[in-house]
Image (spheres, coloured by chain):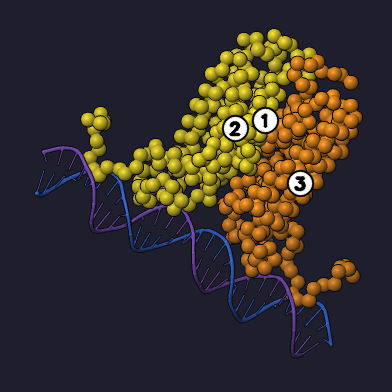
Chain colours: A yellow, B orange, C purple, D blue
Amino acid sequence: MFQNAARPRGRPRRFDEAEALEKATQVYWSKGYDGATIDDLVAGMGVGRPSLYSVFGDKRTLFLRVLRAYAERKGALAAKALLSPQSLRDSVASFLRHAVESATEEGSAPGCLLACVAPLVNDAEVRQFVRNAADSAVALVERRFRDGISAGDIPSDFPVAARASQTLDLVRGLTMRAQMGAPRKTLLEDAEAAADLVLLPRGGNAAPEP
Amino acid sequence: MFQNAARPRGRPRRFDEAEALEKATQVYWSKGYDGATIDDLVAGMGVGRPSLYSVFGDKRTLFLRVLRAYAERKGALAAKALLSPQSLRDSVASFLRHAVESATEEGSAPGCLLACVAPLVNDAEVRQFVRNAADSAVALVERRFRDGISAGDIPSDFPVAARASQTLDLVRGLTMRAQMGAPRKTLLEDAEAAADLVLLPRGGNAAPEP
DNA sequence: GGCATTTTGAAACATTTAGTTCGAAACTCC
DNA sequence: GGAGTTTCGAACTAAATGTTTCAAAATGCC
């Protein structure tokens, strides 16, 4: 009555797969890939060791699943933060603010799994994934800048590509400071300032006031 | 005749302490703190295991020594890059360029020990050290900005504190991209653009052309 | 040359780690 | 209720890891 999907045949699982993956995210996030032991994961996920291996594969495979789920979830939130607001300035500020809030969320380790811990993992597939995620992020910001040009929020000679990658560099900087323990309040103020900076008109020209 | 310092009494060391520390830097840098095993260090440093322990202490102590030496060396180079040029724009560009060059140096792992691997080490002393290094760096840039105001390179209402921390956030972003495998050429171009960005006059005002 | 002193290399040690095995438990289907 | 299927918990294994021990080697001092 409660589940429309037919219940599988054998003994039912004691854990929820998505929930366990979320818990695994926290473990990897707070301890790093090498620093997280299987015991840490077993304890943090609330899953027996054999279940961990049979359901999620080995440590590396689990990390990849964690990373993919994390990137999908956080990527969607970041895109929403960037694309929801009307004005470009609000979009960029919201994007940066979201990054800071996510990196300073209580209950999670500070920083960012994708930005701070994954790049350090010595694995070709992980590194490729991180690169792709970074490329997607800058492409997203670039698109928003182009829409801002169409909407007249910024001049048509706005250096879209450069400012997009600078926006992401600033996000990385804020995220790393979050991991280093910088307080959320400071970082939120800096996020606002960063939004102002990347939207500044090119040097040497007067700023148009639309 | 060769050494003015009296030679110590016992069997002479087969390795140079500073050189071994440099090699250890490379090992920690490329493999991370948890990822670097004592075997890696012994192999990379060209030092026997007992010598490693008797001279450098345990793994954690060695990492702290490595980190301190690294920060001192790289900090001096960064300060030189920032303070040598005459014009402010050259200073900032040189600072950013130096960061990129250091993070993409061949023969070393990409990225930065202090920016990419140390913050992930789960140790209070390491984290404190990283925080202090970050604070020193932003203070250095702030000072350069203030000198730039005195020299008339930038207007007196230039937001020194904000732009200094943004400069360092951009450095962090560039460094992380280096670690992710971004090519040096791209990063050097982006470093120039970053220097232009952080020196842009405040929005809404025309840029003074001195 | 012999003695004190320091470093070295190889091996040993205790612990931790990633990954597996296996019987018992919990469920569905008949 | 019993057969078949899947998961669970605990113990196990083999390898890796951080650290130490110890005798032999290399030096200075007398």
Residue occupying the point 85% across, 38% down: B83
Which residue position holds label 1? A190
Measured from the top left, where is residue A78 in percent x and y?
54, 27
Q: Is residue A27 left or right of residue B123?
A: left
Which residue position holds label 3? B74
Quadrant where the image shows the N terminus of chain B? bottom right
Q: Is residue A5 above or below residue B72?
A: above
Q: Are marks 1 and 3 on the same chain?
A: no
Which residue position holds label 2? A100
Q: Is residue A9 above or below residue A207?
A: below
Would you call the spot at circle 1 few (<14 residues within 10 Å), some (14-19), or many (20 or more)? many
Q: Earlier in the sequence, mark 2 or mark 1?
A: 2
Query: Which amino acid type is shown beneath numbered disc 2?
Result: Val
Residue A157 quadrant? top right
Q: CA distance from mark 3 to mark 2?
A: 28 Å
Query: Which amino acid type is shown beneath numbered disc 3?
Result: Lys
Residue occupying the point 80% across, 33% down: B92
Are dots 2 and 1 in contact, CB under 8 Å? Answer: yes
Are dots 3 and 2 in contact, CB under 8 Å? Answer: no
